[in-house]
Amino acid sequence: MTVLQTLLEELSGVLPGNMTSLFALTRQVKLEEGEAYIREGDKSRRLAFIEKGIIRAYTLKQNGDEATLFLRWEGHFVASHDTIIHSIPARFTYRALEACSLIEIDYDELDDVLRRQPELEHLRNYFLLKMLSDALEGLEGFVLLSHEERYQRLLENRWDIVNRVPDKYIASMLGITPVSLSRIRKRIHNKGRNQG
Amino acid sequence: MTVLQTLLEELSGVLPGNMTSLFALTRQVKLEEGEAYIREGDKSRRLAFIEKGIIRAYTLKQNGDEATLFLRWEGHFVASHDTIIHSIPARFTYRALEACSLIEIDYDELDDVLRRQPELEHLRNYFLLKMLSDALEGLEGFVLLSHEERYQRLLENRWDIVNRVPDKYIASMLGITPVSLSRIRKRIHNKGRNQG
DNA sequence: AAAGGAAATTAACAAAAGTTAATTTCATCC
DNA sequence: GGATGAAATTAACTTTTGTTAATTTCCTTT
């Protein structure tokens, strides 16, 4: 039984048997480090649970630099909100930062199953609420915290993830340049020295 | 028939009769300008559709300044995500910037109705996806755009709303100070003069 | 019309971030 | 183990923002 199955059963309280129609539609996908899962311009509406690895969503800014929108890792779902919510081609590329193991499903097929088995609908609610909560938490950071505080918070809450990801992607996610992040790191380090 | 009823029926394709149990639980709420709808610390799980007016979600930063997380206006739903998603007391205050007319429902009662009438579940999906989309769009702005570009985008997309809201709240939403927003406005104005 | 008060602008200076480029670190490959 | 190349740091300089305070604008009230 997979991590995902265990998770879903805990959340839904539904017996494994009733999940058969759901899991019949899933397939395992392996990505090599650096491999793209969804490319900018793709129209496929696939959705994946991350069993292992980190995926980075990014796009090119007008000035040519990459901008990282978010990272997702073990236990998260990843999908292009452009294709699923708005039915437009993906405006971001979703690429594996590490070798990844995913469990994939087509969103439209998932939708069919949920329509036929409304007792599973609260799974969808659960994950939508979780994603909404994450997004709002991100927004909060930008409104409430300075760049330095935002990085500090990331270190406190996700030290393990920050450690697995090159700083330049972290910087971009924080809305700053790598040079600026480096200065922030130095500042934090010096504070630690002087003030304990 | 209210704006909300019309909207829901368009979205759900469900006949008015089936919505009776839903609307039996709603009540209209009027707020004066400056009146709070939900206060920081509140535990109530109410949810409201905004028929008329603008509501601002804000909290006090550690330094004592107010930080505005978002604005919601006609056609949006407003609720404390802290109480509804996480079941913790609201960390933000939701206050009417203008006199408001709301249609309110208790989230737990709504939840009951949706469980009993699963044919309405896709309404919840629709609104959750819409809120998620809004939140992600906000995040995108912080990652992809400079302060000036973010303000420009707001002017282009929501000129009518920006016009109804004091600049200091707009500035806070953009993650900058009122002084800085004022300078940005001047810069934009001057560009318009010189470069047409 | 005058007064009062909040919001917005401006000014002046300090702090932080952007930009470009040089330098150093560090992991990887041969 | 030395070469290679990307990432991170540092440096030097410019631009933007933060901060505090003064000034102006604008709206409301009397």
Image (cartoon, coloured by chain):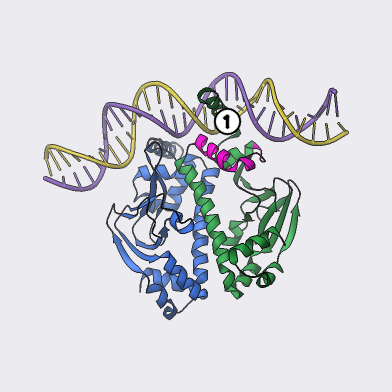
Chain colours: A green, B blue, C yellow, D purple
Percent x, y of residue A88:
60, 59
Image position of D11 (left or right of A36): left
> Is B7 located above or below residue D6 in the figure?
below
| Quadrant in which residue B178 is drawn | top left
Image position of A147 (left or right of B99): right
The chief SS type of the magenta part is: helix
Magenta run includes residue A53: no
| Quadrant in which residue B187 is drawn | top left
Percent x, y of residue A137:
50, 48
Stretch of the chain drawn in magenta: A146-166
Percent x, y of residue B5:
40, 72
Residue flagged by tag 1: what amino acid is it?
A: Arg
Image position of A31 (left or right of B99): right
Percent x, y of residue B158:
42, 52
Give the residue drawn at x 74%, y 57%.
A29
Q: Could you tell me which secondary element the residue under label 1 belongs to?
A: helix
Q: Nearer the viewer, residue A160 or A82?
A: A160
Q: Which residue is disc 1 drawn over?
A: A185
Instruction: Count every numbered label the image shows and give the total.
Output: 1
| Quadrant in which residue A114 is drawn | bottom right
Q: Nearer the viewer, residue A62 or B23?
A: B23
